[in-house]
Protein backbone atom coordinates (compact mmCIF):
# COMPACT_ATOMS: atom_id res chain seq x y z
CA UNK A 1 0.00 0.00 0.00
CA UNK A 2 2.74 2.39 0.95
CA UNK A 3 4.62 1.48 -2.10
CA UNK A 4 1.65 2.24 -4.22
CA UNK A 5 1.35 5.67 -2.71
CA UNK A 6 5.01 6.40 -3.29
CA UNK A 7 4.71 5.28 -6.88
CA UNK A 8 1.63 7.43 -7.30
CA UNK A 9 3.43 10.47 -5.85
CA UNK A 10 6.48 9.93 -8.05
CA UNK A 11 4.23 9.47 -11.04
CA UNK A 12 2.39 12.71 -10.23
CA UNK A 13 5.60 14.66 -9.72
CA UNK A 14 7.16 13.40 -12.96
CA UNK A 15 3.90 13.98 -14.79
CA UNK A 16 3.71 17.59 -13.53
CA UNK A 17 7.38 18.17 -14.40
CA UNK A 18 6.73 16.84 -17.86
CA UNK A 19 3.73 19.08 -18.28
CA UNK A 20 5.79 22.05 -17.11
CA UNK A 21 8.55 21.27 -19.57
CA UNK A 22 6.04 20.88 -22.37
CA UNK A 23 4.34 24.16 -21.46
CA UNK A 24 7.71 25.92 -21.27
CA UNK A 25 8.64 24.63 -24.67
CA UNK A 26 5.32 25.72 -26.11
CA UNK A 27 5.64 29.20 -24.53
CA UNK A 28 9.16 29.58 -25.84
CA UNK A 29 8.00 28.64 -29.32
CA UNK A 30 5.12 31.09 -29.08
CA UNK A 31 7.43 33.83 -27.88
CA UNK A 32 9.82 33.29 -30.75
CA UNK A 33 6.91 33.34 -33.20
CA UNK A 34 5.64 36.64 -31.74
CA UNK A 35 9.14 38.12 -31.96
CA UNK A 36 9.45 37.07 -35.58
CA UNK A 37 6.04 38.61 -36.39
CA UNK A 38 6.98 41.81 -34.55
CA UNK A 39 10.25 42.03 -36.48
CA UNK A 40 8.37 41.54 -39.74
CA UNK A 41 5.83 44.27 -38.81
CA UNK A 42 8.64 46.60 -37.72
CA UNK A 43 10.36 46.01 -41.04
CA UNK A 44 7.12 46.82 -42.87
CA UNK A 45 6.58 49.99 -40.79
CA UNK A 46 10.18 51.00 -41.40
CA UNK A 47 9.77 50.59 -45.13
CA UNK A 48 6.49 52.59 -45.07
CA UNK A 49 8.07 55.42 -43.10
CA UNK A 50 11.01 55.49 -45.45
CA UNK A 51 8.61 55.74 -48.38
CA UNK A 52 6.69 58.58 -46.69
CA UNK A 53 9.94 60.44 -45.96
CA UNK A 54 11.00 60.01 -49.57
CA UNK A 55 7.65 61.34 -50.80
CA UNK A 56 7.83 64.35 -48.46
CA UNK A 57 11.40 64.98 -49.55
CA UNK A 58 10.33 64.87 -53.20
CA UNK A 59 7.41 67.30 -52.50
CA UNK A 60 9.65 69.69 -50.55
CA UNK A 61 12.26 69.55 -53.27
CA UNK A 62 9.60 70.37 -55.86
CA UNK A 63 8.30 73.28 -53.74
CA UNK A 64 11.80 74.64 -53.24
CA UNK A 65 12.52 74.39 -56.94
CA UNK A 66 9.26 76.18 -57.67
CA UNK A 67 10.09 78.97 -55.16
CA UNK A 68 13.59 79.30 -56.56
CA UNK A 69 12.19 79.61 -60.07
CA UNK A 70 9.69 82.27 -58.90
CA UNK A 71 12.43 84.22 -57.17
CA UNK A 72 14.60 83.99 -60.21
CA UNK A 73 11.72 85.32 -62.29
CA UNK A 74 11.25 88.23 -59.87
CA UNK A 75 14.95 88.98 -59.86
CA UNK A 76 14.96 89.00 -63.65
CA UNK A 77 11.90 91.33 -63.65
CA UNK A 78 13.60 93.72 -61.16
CA UNK A 79 16.78 93.65 -63.22
CA UNK A 80 14.78 94.52 -66.31
CA UNK A 81 13.12 97.43 -64.51
CA UNK A 82 16.46 98.68 -63.18
CA UNK A 83 17.89 98.56 -66.67
CA UNK A 84 14.89 100.54 -67.96
CA UNK A 85 15.31 103.11 -65.19
CA UNK A 86 18.97 103.40 -65.95
CA UNK A 87 18.10 104.07 -69.56
CA UNK A 88 15.51 106.70 -68.51
CA UNK A 89 17.97 108.38 -66.14
CA UNK A 90 20.57 108.57 -68.89
CA UNK A 91 17.98 110.17 -71.20
CA UNK A 92 16.99 112.71 -68.51
CA UNK A 93 20.61 113.53 -67.78
CA UNK A 94 21.18 114.21 -71.44
CA UNK A 95 18.03 116.38 -71.54
CA UNK A 96 19.12 118.35 -68.44
CA UNK A 97 22.53 118.91 -69.96
CA UNK A 98 20.90 120.24 -73.09
CA UNK A 99 18.63 122.56 -71.05
CA UNK A 100 21.60 123.83 -69.04
CA UNK A 101 23.31 124.73 -72.25
CA UNK A 102 20.18 126.62 -73.37
CA UNK A 103 20.00 128.46 -69.99
CA UNK A 104 23.61 129.57 -70.34
CA UNK A 105 22.79 130.98 -73.75
CA UNK A 106 19.74 132.81 -72.36
CA UNK A 107 21.81 134.24 -69.47
CA UNK A 108 24.29 135.64 -71.90
CA UNK A 109 21.47 137.25 -73.91
CA UNK A 110 19.90 138.70 -70.73
CA UNK A 111 23.18 140.17 -69.57
CA UNK A 112 23.52 141.91 -72.92
CA UNK A 113 19.95 143.21 -72.73
CA UNK A 114 20.45 144.43 -69.12
CA UNK A 115 23.50 146.41 -70.19
CA UNK A 116 21.42 147.95 -72.94
CA UNK A 117 18.56 148.79 -70.51
CA UNK A 118 20.99 150.39 -68.04
CA UNK A 119 22.37 152.61 -70.77
CA UNK A 120 18.82 153.59 -71.79
CA UNK A 121 17.96 154.34 -68.10
CA UNK A 122 20.95 156.66 -67.76
CA UNK A 123 19.85 158.50 -70.88
CA UNK A 124 16.29 158.80 -69.50
CA UNK A 125 17.56 160.15 -66.15
CA UNK A 126 19.53 162.84 -67.98
CA UNK A 127 16.43 163.77 -70.02
CA UNK A 128 14.28 163.81 -66.80
CA UNK A 129 16.70 166.19 -65.09
CA UNK A 130 16.64 168.46 -68.09
CA UNK A 131 12.80 168.47 -68.14
CA UNK A 132 12.60 169.18 -64.39
CA UNK A 133 15.00 172.11 -64.74
CA UNK A 134 12.97 173.38 -67.66
CA UNK A 135 9.66 173.10 -65.68
CA UNK A 136 11.19 174.80 -62.62
CA UNK A 137 12.37 177.69 -64.78
CA UNK A 138 8.89 178.02 -66.34
CA UNK A 139 6.84 177.74 -63.06
CA UNK A 140 9.18 179.54 -60.74
CA UNK A 141 8.83 176.63 -58.20
CA UNK A 142 11.30 174.01 -57.18
CA UNK A 143 10.46 170.32 -57.54
CA UNK A 144 10.04 169.89 -53.75
CA UNK A 145 7.64 172.86 -53.52
CA UNK A 146 5.56 171.56 -56.43
CA UNK A 147 5.45 168.11 -54.82
CA UNK A 148 4.26 169.57 -51.48
CA UNK A 149 1.51 171.58 -53.20
CA UNK A 150 0.37 168.50 -55.11
CA UNK A 151 0.30 166.41 -51.91
CA UNK A 152 -1.74 169.07 -50.09
CA UNK A 153 -4.30 169.27 -52.89
CA UNK A 154 -4.57 165.47 -52.96
CA UNK A 155 -5.02 165.40 -49.17
CA UNK A 156 -7.88 167.90 -49.28
CA UNK A 157 -9.57 166.02 -52.10
CA UNK A 158 -9.15 162.68 -50.26
CA UNK A 159 -10.57 164.15 -47.02
CA UNK A 160 -13.64 165.45 -48.85
CA UNK A 161 -14.22 162.12 -50.58
CA UNK A 162 -13.67 160.21 -47.31
CA UNK A 163 -16.17 162.41 -45.43
CA UNK A 164 -18.73 161.89 -48.15
CA UNK A 165 -18.08 158.14 -48.17
CA UNK A 166 -18.33 157.94 -44.36
CA UNK A 167 -21.64 159.82 -44.39
CA UNK A 168 -23.05 157.44 -46.99
CA UNK A 169 -21.91 154.41 -44.98
CA UNK A 170 -23.36 155.88 -41.76
CA UNK A 171 -26.72 156.54 -43.40
CA UNK A 172 -26.81 153.07 -44.93
CA UNK A 173 -25.83 151.50 -41.58
CA UNK A 174 -28.58 153.43 -39.78
CA UNK A 175 -31.18 152.30 -42.28
CA UNK A 176 -29.98 148.69 -42.16
CA UNK A 177 -29.70 148.66 -38.36
CA UNK A 178 -33.20 150.10 -37.97
CA UNK A 179 -34.59 147.50 -40.36
CA UNK A 180 -32.76 144.61 -38.64
CA UNK A 181 -33.82 145.80 -35.19
CA UNK A 182 -37.47 145.96 -36.25
CA UNK A 183 -37.17 142.50 -37.79
CA UNK A 184 -35.70 141.01 -34.59
CA UNK A 185 -38.35 142.64 -32.37
CA UNK A 186 -41.20 141.48 -34.63
CA UNK A 187 -39.84 137.92 -34.81
CA UNK A 188 -39.44 137.84 -31.03
CA UNK A 189 -43.04 138.96 -30.48
CA UNK A 190 -44.38 136.46 -33.02
CA UNK A 191 -42.48 133.52 -31.55
CA UNK A 192 -43.69 134.00 -27.96
CA UNK A 193 -47.05 132.45 -27.17
CA UNK A 194 -48.56 134.50 -24.34
CA UNK A 195 -51.68 134.03 -22.32
CA UNK A 196 -54.13 136.84 -22.86
CA UNK A 197 -56.14 136.18 -19.70
CA UNK A 198 -55.33 138.73 -16.98
CA UNK A 199 -55.05 137.32 -13.49
CA UNK A 200 -55.48 139.33 -10.35
CA UNK A 201 -55.58 138.72 -6.63
CA UNK A 202 -59.14 137.88 -5.57
CA UNK A 203 -60.58 140.39 -3.11
CA UNK A 204 -64.25 139.30 -3.10
CA UNK A 205 -65.31 136.10 -1.29
CA UNK A 206 -68.61 134.66 -2.48
CA UNK A 207 -70.91 132.80 -0.06
CA UNK A 208 -73.97 130.70 -0.70
CA UNK A 209 -76.35 132.65 1.50
CA UNK A 210 -76.44 135.66 3.80
CA UNK A 211 -76.99 133.37 6.82
CA UNK A 212 -73.29 132.48 6.77
CA UNK A 213 -72.40 136.17 7.23
CA UNK A 214 -73.71 136.05 10.78
CA UNK A 215 -71.66 132.97 11.58
CA UNK A 216 -68.55 134.61 10.12
CA UNK A 217 -69.12 137.74 12.22
CA UNK A 218 -69.80 135.68 15.35
CA UNK A 219 -71.17 136.78 18.69
CA UNK A 220 -70.30 140.45 19.23
CA UNK A 221 -67.96 140.22 16.24
CA UNK A 222 -65.50 137.83 17.91
CA UNK A 223 -65.04 135.61 14.86
CA UNK A 224 -64.40 138.42 12.38
CA UNK A 225 -61.98 140.15 14.77
CA UNK A 226 -60.09 136.89 15.28
CA UNK A 227 -59.95 136.38 11.51
CA UNK A 228 -58.70 139.93 10.90
CA UNK A 229 -56.07 139.58 13.65
CA UNK A 230 -54.86 136.21 12.30
CA UNK A 231 -54.67 137.25 8.64
CA UNK A 232 -53.91 140.97 8.83
CA UNK A 233 -56.70 141.63 6.31
CA UNK A 234 -59.70 143.88 6.81
CA UNK A 235 -62.93 141.95 6.23
CA UNK A 236 -65.83 144.11 5.09
CA UNK A 237 -69.29 142.60 5.60
CA UNK A 238 -71.93 144.93 4.17
CA UNK A 239 -75.29 144.69 2.43
CA UNK A 240 -73.80 143.24 -0.75
CA UNK A 241 -75.70 140.00 -1.30
CA UNK A 242 -73.74 136.76 -1.02
CA UNK A 243 -70.36 138.49 -0.95
CA UNK A 244 -67.71 139.52 1.56
CA UNK A 245 -64.95 141.97 0.61
CA UNK A 246 -61.35 141.23 1.68
CA UNK A 247 -59.34 144.46 1.80
CA UNK A 248 -55.57 144.58 2.23
CA UNK A 249 -52.40 145.76 0.48
CA UNK A 250 -50.67 142.33 0.59
CA UNK A 251 -52.05 139.91 -2.05
CA UNK A 252 -50.57 136.89 -0.25
CA UNK A 253 -52.45 137.79 2.91
CA UNK A 254 -55.63 138.24 0.90
CA UNK A 255 -55.15 134.76 -0.57
CA UNK A 256 -54.57 133.29 2.90
CA UNK A 257 -57.76 134.99 4.17
CA UNK A 258 -59.77 133.76 1.17
CA UNK A 259 -58.64 130.14 1.51
CA UNK A 260 -59.13 130.19 5.30
CA UNK A 261 -62.68 131.55 4.90
CA UNK A 262 -63.38 128.90 2.29
CA UNK A 263 -62.26 126.07 4.60
CA UNK A 264 -64.12 127.51 7.62
CA UNK A 265 -67.36 127.86 5.67
CA UNK A 266 -67.06 124.33 4.28
CA UNK A 267 -66.24 122.88 7.72
CA UNK A 268 -69.00 124.82 9.50
CA UNK A 269 -67.05 125.16 12.74
CA UNK A 270 -66.29 128.89 13.06
CA UNK A 271 -64.86 130.09 16.37
CA UNK A 272 -61.64 131.94 17.35
CA UNK A 273 -59.58 128.85 18.19
CA UNK A 274 -60.61 127.08 15.00
CA UNK A 275 -59.97 130.25 12.98
CA UNK A 276 -56.42 130.54 14.29
CA UNK A 277 -55.74 126.86 13.57
CA UNK A 278 -57.11 127.04 10.00
CA UNK A 279 -55.27 130.30 9.22
CA UNK A 280 -51.92 128.83 10.35
CA UNK A 281 -52.55 125.70 8.29
CA UNK A 282 -53.54 127.72 5.19
CA UNK A 283 -50.56 130.05 5.60
CA UNK A 284 -48.24 127.05 5.56
CA UNK A 285 -50.02 125.70 2.46
CA UNK A 286 -49.68 129.05 0.67
CA UNK A 287 -45.98 129.26 1.56
CA UNK A 288 -45.45 125.77 0.17
CA UNK A 289 -47.44 126.71 -2.93
CA UNK A 290 -45.28 129.84 -3.39
CA UNK A 291 -42.05 127.79 -3.28
CA UNK A 292 -43.53 125.11 -5.57
CA UNK A 293 -44.65 127.77 -8.07
CA UNK A 294 -41.16 129.30 -8.08
CA UNK A 295 -39.52 125.91 -8.66
CA UNK A 296 -41.98 124.98 -11.40
CA UNK A 297 -41.42 128.33 -13.14
CA UNK A 298 -37.63 127.91 -13.05
CA UNK A 299 -37.90 124.35 -14.40
CA UNK A 300 -40.32 125.37 -17.17
CA UNK A 301 -37.92 128.10 -18.32
CA UNK A 302 -34.83 125.89 -17.99
CA UNK A 303 -33.17 128.15 -15.42
CA UNK A 304 -30.95 126.38 -12.87
CA UNK A 305 -28.89 127.33 -9.83
CA UNK A 306 -31.22 130.01 -8.42
CA UNK A 307 -30.94 130.75 -4.72
CA UNK A 308 -33.88 129.28 -2.73
CA UNK A 309 -34.88 132.77 -1.59
CA UNK A 310 -35.04 134.01 -5.19
CA UNK A 311 -37.17 130.97 -6.08
CA UNK A 312 -39.55 131.88 -3.23
CA UNK A 313 -39.81 135.49 -4.44
CA UNK A 314 -40.51 134.28 -7.99
CA UNK A 315 -43.36 132.13 -6.67
CA UNK A 316 -44.64 135.14 -4.74
CA UNK A 317 -45.06 136.99 -8.04
CA UNK A 318 -48.08 134.79 -8.73
CA UNK A 319 -50.07 136.76 -6.14
CA UNK A 320 -48.93 140.19 -7.32
CA UNK A 321 -50.34 142.20 -10.22
CA UNK A 322 -49.05 145.38 -11.82
CA UNK A 323 -51.82 147.53 -13.28
CA UNK A 324 -53.94 144.43 -13.82
CA UNK A 325 -51.15 142.33 -15.40
CA UNK A 326 -50.11 139.29 -13.38
CA UNK A 327 -46.48 139.80 -12.39
CA UNK A 328 -45.39 136.17 -12.76
CA UNK A 329 -46.95 135.92 -16.23
CA UNK A 330 -45.23 139.18 -17.18
CA UNK A 331 -41.86 137.87 -15.90
CA UNK A 332 -42.22 134.59 -17.84
CA UNK A 333 -43.17 136.44 -21.01
CA UNK A 334 -40.25 138.85 -20.64
CA UNK A 335 -37.86 135.93 -20.04
CA UNK A 336 -38.96 134.15 -23.23
CA UNK A 337 -38.73 137.36 -25.25
CA UNK A 338 -35.23 138.04 -23.90
CA UNK A 339 -34.06 134.54 -24.83
CA UNK A 340 -35.37 134.85 -28.39
CA UNK A 341 -33.92 138.31 -28.90
CA UNK A 342 -30.53 137.29 -27.46
CA UNK A 343 -30.41 134.28 -29.81
CA UNK A 344 -31.13 136.52 -32.79
CA UNK A 345 -28.29 138.86 -31.72
CA UNK A 346 -25.81 136.03 -31.11
CA UNK A 347 -25.76 136.41 -27.30
CA UNK A 348 -26.26 133.87 -24.52
CA UNK A 349 -30.03 133.08 -24.42
CA UNK A 350 -29.85 131.40 -20.98
CA UNK A 351 -28.42 134.49 -19.33
CA UNK A 352 -30.96 136.71 -21.06
CA UNK A 353 -33.82 134.45 -19.94
CA UNK A 354 -32.50 134.52 -16.35
CA UNK A 355 -32.29 138.34 -16.34
CA UNK A 356 -35.78 138.63 -17.86
CA UNK A 357 -37.28 136.40 -15.17
CA UNK A 358 -35.62 138.34 -12.34
CA UNK A 359 -36.09 141.88 -13.67
CA UNK A 360 -39.17 142.68 -11.51
CA UNK A 361 -38.07 140.69 -8.43
CA UNK A 362 -37.88 144.00 -6.54
CA UNK A 363 -41.69 144.31 -6.61
CA UNK A 364 -42.23 141.39 -4.18
CA UNK A 365 -39.81 141.81 -1.26
CA UNK A 366 -40.78 140.78 2.25
CA UNK A 367 -40.13 144.31 3.50
CA UNK A 368 -40.98 147.52 1.64
CA UNK A 369 -37.91 149.82 1.55
CA UNK A 370 -38.15 153.24 -0.07
CA UNK A 371 -36.29 152.25 -3.22
CA UNK A 372 -37.30 151.88 -6.89
CA UNK A 373 -38.12 148.26 -7.63
CA UNK A 374 -35.30 147.98 -10.22
CA UNK A 375 -32.64 149.09 -7.69
CA UNK A 376 -34.13 146.84 -5.01
CA UNK A 377 -34.17 143.90 -7.44
CA UNK A 378 -30.52 144.53 -8.31
CA UNK A 379 -29.58 144.54 -4.61
CA UNK A 380 -31.48 141.28 -4.06
CA UNK A 381 -29.67 139.65 -6.99
CA UNK A 382 -26.31 140.85 -5.66
CA UNK A 383 -27.20 139.55 -2.19
CA UNK A 384 -27.99 136.09 -3.54
CA UNK A 385 -24.81 135.84 -5.66
CA UNK A 386 -26.16 136.42 -9.16
CA UNK A 387 -23.57 137.36 -11.79
CA UNK A 388 -22.74 141.09 -12.31
CA UNK A 389 -24.22 141.27 -15.82
CA UNK A 390 -27.54 139.82 -14.54
CA UNK A 391 -27.59 142.30 -11.63
CA UNK A 392 -26.86 145.22 -13.97
CA UNK A 393 -29.62 144.16 -16.39
CA UNK A 394 -32.13 144.02 -13.50
CA UNK A 395 -31.08 147.42 -12.12
CA UNK A 396 -30.88 149.21 -15.48
CA UNK A 397 -34.17 148.16 -17.07
CA UNK A 398 -35.74 151.52 -16.05
CA UNK A 399 -32.48 153.53 -16.48
CA UNK A 400 -31.91 153.93 -12.72
CA UNK A 401 -28.31 152.73 -13.22
CA UNK A 402 -26.00 152.82 -16.22
CA UNK A 403 -26.18 149.91 -18.64
CA UNK A 404 -22.91 147.98 -18.72
CA UNK A 405 -23.68 144.96 -20.95
CA UNK A 406 -25.90 144.17 -23.93
CA UNK A 407 -28.22 142.19 -21.64
CA UNK A 408 -29.52 145.41 -20.07
CA UNK A 409 -31.07 146.98 -23.22
CA UNK A 410 -32.51 143.58 -24.21
CA UNK A 411 -34.29 143.26 -20.84
CA UNK A 412 -35.50 146.87 -21.08
CA UNK A 413 -36.93 146.38 -24.56
CA UNK A 414 -38.58 143.04 -23.75
CA UNK A 415 -40.09 144.48 -20.55
CA UNK A 416 -41.60 147.27 -22.62
CA UNK A 417 -42.89 144.78 -25.23
CA UNK A 418 -44.56 142.65 -22.54
CA UNK A 419 -45.94 145.41 -20.34
CA UNK A 420 -46.58 148.26 -22.74
CA UNK A 421 -48.49 146.58 -25.52
CA UNK A 422 -52.22 147.39 -25.51
CA UNK A 423 -54.16 144.62 -23.82
CA UNK A 424 -51.32 143.40 -21.63
CA UNK A 425 -52.43 145.54 -18.75
CA UNK A 426 -55.88 146.43 -17.64
CA UNK A 427 -56.40 149.58 -19.63
CA UNK A 428 -58.79 150.28 -22.48
CA UNK A 429 -57.00 150.89 -25.77
CA UNK A 430 -58.80 154.20 -26.35
CA UNK A 431 -57.81 155.42 -22.90
CA UNK A 432 -54.25 154.23 -23.46
CA UNK A 433 -53.94 156.17 -26.75
CA UNK A 434 -55.67 159.22 -25.28
CA UNK A 435 -53.24 159.34 -22.35
CA UNK A 436 -50.26 159.25 -24.73
CA UNK A 437 -51.77 162.01 -26.88
CA UNK A 438 -52.52 164.13 -23.81
CA UNK A 439 -48.92 163.80 -22.67
CA UNK A 440 -47.61 164.95 -26.05
CA UNK A 441 -50.11 167.82 -26.35
CA UNK A 442 -49.34 169.04 -22.84
CA UNK A 443 -45.65 169.36 -23.67
CA UNK A 444 -46.38 170.96 -27.07
CA UNK A 445 -48.28 173.77 -25.33
CA UNK A 446 -44.99 175.27 -24.07
CA UNK A 447 -43.19 177.84 -26.26
CA UNK A 448 -40.06 176.67 -27.98
CA UNK A 449 -41.14 173.01 -28.14
CA UNK A 450 -40.79 171.58 -31.66
CA UNK A 451 -41.77 167.90 -31.26
CA UNK A 452 -42.84 165.54 -28.49
CA UNK A 453 -42.78 161.75 -28.29
CA UNK A 454 -44.44 159.63 -25.59
CA UNK A 455 -42.52 156.33 -25.41
CA UNK A 456 -42.38 153.22 -23.21
CA UNK A 457 -46.17 153.14 -22.83
CA UNK A 458 -46.23 156.68 -21.52
CA UNK A 459 -43.54 156.12 -18.92
CA UNK A 460 -41.17 158.52 -20.71
CA UNK A 461 -41.83 161.78 -22.55
CA UNK A 462 -39.16 163.11 -24.87
CA UNK A 463 -39.42 166.81 -25.72
CA UNK A 464 -37.37 168.31 -28.58
CA UNK A 465 -36.91 172.09 -28.43
CA UNK A 466 -35.46 174.53 -30.91
CA UNK A 467 -31.85 175.44 -30.27
CA UNK A 468 -32.46 179.04 -31.34
CA UNK A 469 -35.44 179.51 -29.01
CA UNK A 470 -34.33 177.97 -25.70
CA UNK A 471 -30.84 177.86 -24.15
CA UNK A 472 -29.33 175.08 -22.04
CA UNK A 473 -30.39 176.58 -18.71
CA UNK A 474 -34.01 176.98 -19.79
CA UNK A 475 -34.22 173.31 -20.84
CA UNK A 476 -33.82 172.19 -17.23
CA UNK A 477 -36.53 174.60 -16.09
CA UNK A 478 -38.79 173.39 -18.89
CA UNK A 479 -38.44 169.73 -17.84
CA UNK A 480 -39.32 170.63 -14.24
CA UNK A 481 -42.37 172.68 -15.33
CA UNK A 482 -43.68 169.88 -17.59
CA UNK A 483 -43.21 167.30 -14.80
CA UNK A 484 -45.10 169.49 -12.32
CA UNK A 485 -47.92 170.11 -14.76
CA UNK A 486 -48.27 166.36 -15.49
CA UNK A 487 -48.44 165.65 -11.74
CA UNK A 488 -51.15 168.28 -11.22
CA UNK A 489 -53.33 167.67 -14.28
CA UNK A 490 -53.03 164.02 -15.32
CA UNK A 491 -53.71 160.55 -13.90
CA UNK A 492 -51.16 157.89 -14.84
CA UNK A 493 -49.67 154.67 -13.47
CA UNK A 494 -46.17 154.67 -12.02
CA UNK A 495 -43.91 157.56 -12.94
CA UNK A 496 -43.24 159.55 -16.10
CA UNK A 497 -39.70 160.51 -17.06
CA UNK A 498 -39.40 163.84 -18.95
CA UNK A 499 -36.34 164.26 -21.21
CA UNK A 500 -35.81 167.62 -22.91
CA UNK A 501 -33.45 167.49 -25.92
CA UNK A 502 -31.83 170.60 -27.37
CA UNK A 503 -29.64 170.07 -30.40
CA UNK A 504 -27.92 172.17 -33.03
CA UNK A 505 -27.77 170.92 -36.61
CA UNK A 506 -25.64 172.14 -39.49
CA UNK A 507 -27.06 171.29 -42.94
CA UNK A 508 -25.37 172.07 -46.28
CA UNK A 509 -26.30 171.25 -49.87
CA UNK A 510 -23.94 170.60 -52.79
CA UNK A 511 -25.28 172.17 -55.98
Image (cartoon, rainbow, N blue to C red):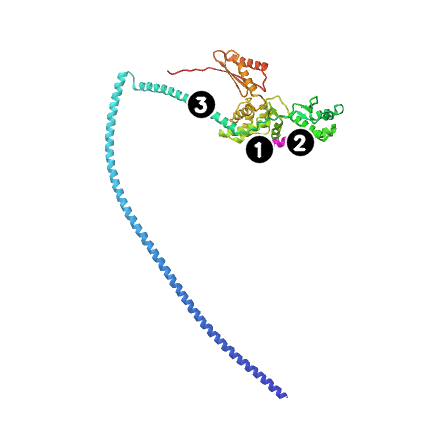
The magenta region covers: 284-300
- What residue is shown with label 2? 285
Choose between 320 and 105: the one closer to the eye.
Answer: 320
Q: Earlier in the sequence, mark 3 or mark 2?
A: 3
Q: Can residue 392 be seen in this view?
A: no
Q: Going by the image, does 472 lie left or right of 96?
A: right
Q: Which of marks 2 and 1 is nearer the N terminus?
A: 2
Alpha-carbon span between mark 2 and mark 1: 22 Å
Q: Is residue 295 magenta?
A: yes
Farthest right residue in view: 219
Determine whether 256 is above or below 133 in the image: below
Dominant secondary structure (helix, strand or loop) of the stretch shown in magenta: helix
Q: Is residue 152 magenta?
A: no
- What residue is shown with label 1? 300
SS label for mark 1: helix
Contact check, label 2 and label 1, Cβ < 8 Å: no
Q: Which of marks 1 and 3 is nearer the N terminus?
A: 3
Residue 297 position in % (x across, y down): 59, 31
Residue 169 position in % (x across, y down): 41, 23
Q: Is residue 176 visible?
A: yes
Determine whether 360 is above or below 480 in the image: below
- What residue is shown with label 3? 175
SS label for mark 3: helix
Amino acid sequence: MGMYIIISIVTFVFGGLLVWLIMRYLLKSRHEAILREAEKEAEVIKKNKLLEVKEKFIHLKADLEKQVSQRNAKIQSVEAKLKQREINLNQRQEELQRKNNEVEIVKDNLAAQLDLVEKKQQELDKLHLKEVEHLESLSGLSAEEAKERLIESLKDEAKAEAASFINEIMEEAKMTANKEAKKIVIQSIQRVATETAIENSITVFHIESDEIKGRIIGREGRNIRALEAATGIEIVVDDTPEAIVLSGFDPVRREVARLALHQLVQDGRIHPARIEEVVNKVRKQVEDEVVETGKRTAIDLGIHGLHPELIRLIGKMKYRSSYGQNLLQHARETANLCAIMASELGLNPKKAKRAGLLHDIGKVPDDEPELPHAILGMKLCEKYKEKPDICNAVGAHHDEVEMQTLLAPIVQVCDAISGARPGARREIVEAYIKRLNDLEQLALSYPGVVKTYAIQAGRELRVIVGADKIDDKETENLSNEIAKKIQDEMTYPGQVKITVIRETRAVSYAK
